[in-house]
Image: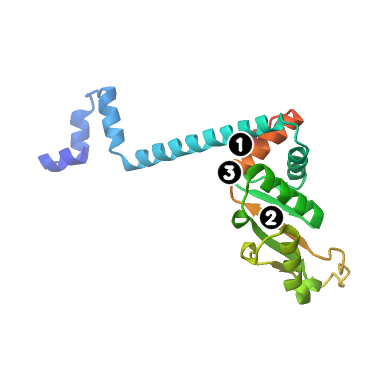
Amino acid sequence: MKEIARAVGCTLSSVSHWTRDISLTPEQYAALRSRNPAINGQLVAAANASRARARRVAFQEEGRRLAHRGDRLHVAGCMLYWAEGSKSRNSVQFVNSDPEMVRYFVTFLRAHFAVPDEKLRLDCNLFADHIERQLSIEQFWLDTLGLPRSCLRKSTVNVYSKHSKKKRQNRLPYGTVRVCVHSTRVVQSIYGSIQEYGRFKQPKWLD
C-alpha cells in the first residue's frame, strides 16, 4: 500500500480508503505474508522448533526401546540420572560427590552411548578448605574417570561466610563434580528410558 501511495502521490490513508472494499484471494494473502520479514521469521522459527521437538520425540522413543533390553548397567545409569541429574532438555549434567557413583555413571555413558572422552566436560565445586589442594583434587577426579586434563573446566570455589565458623571442613574431601555431555540425543534417550522403566510420562522433559 505504501508503494501505491508513493506511485500516485497521495497519502496512505487515501489509498486505504480507496481500497477498503477490495477482497484479496487466499493466494494474494499468502503472497503478501511471504514478503513480510517478521512473519517469515516467525514461520522459520516455528518450523525449526517443530523439527527439534520431533527429534526429541524420536530420541525418547529410542530410549524406550533400550529399556526393554533389560541391561543392568543401563537400568542403573538411568536411575542414577533420574535421582541426581539436572533435567536439562539438551545436555546431560550429573553432579555428585561420590567418586564411585560418578565413575559408574560415566561408564554407563561410554557403554550405551559411545560418548568419547573429548565430549565429556568436567568441573569441580570446591570449598575454602580445598584451595591448597585444588590441583590435586581436580587430578583425582580426572584419574577416577580416566579423562585427560583437556576435559576439565574452571572449578568453582565457595568461600566461607562470616557466620560459618569454618565448621564444614573435611565433610566432602573432594568437593563435588559435575559431568556434562552436550547431546540432545543422549539426554532425551535417557528420559525416554526412565519413563519406560517407571511407567509414567513427563511432558516437561520433552518441551
Q: Nearer the viewer, residue 108 or 134?
A: 108
Q: Are marks 2 and 3 in contact (CB under 8 Å)?
A: no
Residue 79, x across and y down, in percent: 77, 40
- Where is the C terminus found, in terms of image quarters? top right
For numbered disc 2, what is the local secondary structure?
Answer: strand
| Residue 104 marker | none
Residue for badge 2: 179
Q: Given the image, on which type of amino acid does mark 2 rest?
A: Val
Q: Given the image, on which type of amino acid does mark 3 rest?
A: Thr
Cα–Cα gap, marks 2 and 1: 21 Å
Q: Quadrant of residue 191?
A: top right
Residue 25, x across and y down, in percent: 26, 22
Q: Quadrant of residue 168?
A: bottom right
Residue for badge 3: 184
Residue for badge 1: 206
* Vertical placement of residue 55 versus 27, above or below: below
Q: Determine the residue located farthest toward the left in the rendered image.
A: 8
The mark lying in front, picked from 2 and 1, is 2
Q: Residues within 10 Å of mark 2 (few under 14, many from 20)?
A: many
User: In this rendering, does residue 197 appear at all?
Assistant: yes
Q: Given the image, on which type of amino acid does mark 1 rest?
A: Leu
Q: Nearer the viewer, residue 169 or 20?
A: 169
Q: Is residue 134 left or right of residue 2?
A: right
- Where is the N terminus found, in terms of image quarters? top left
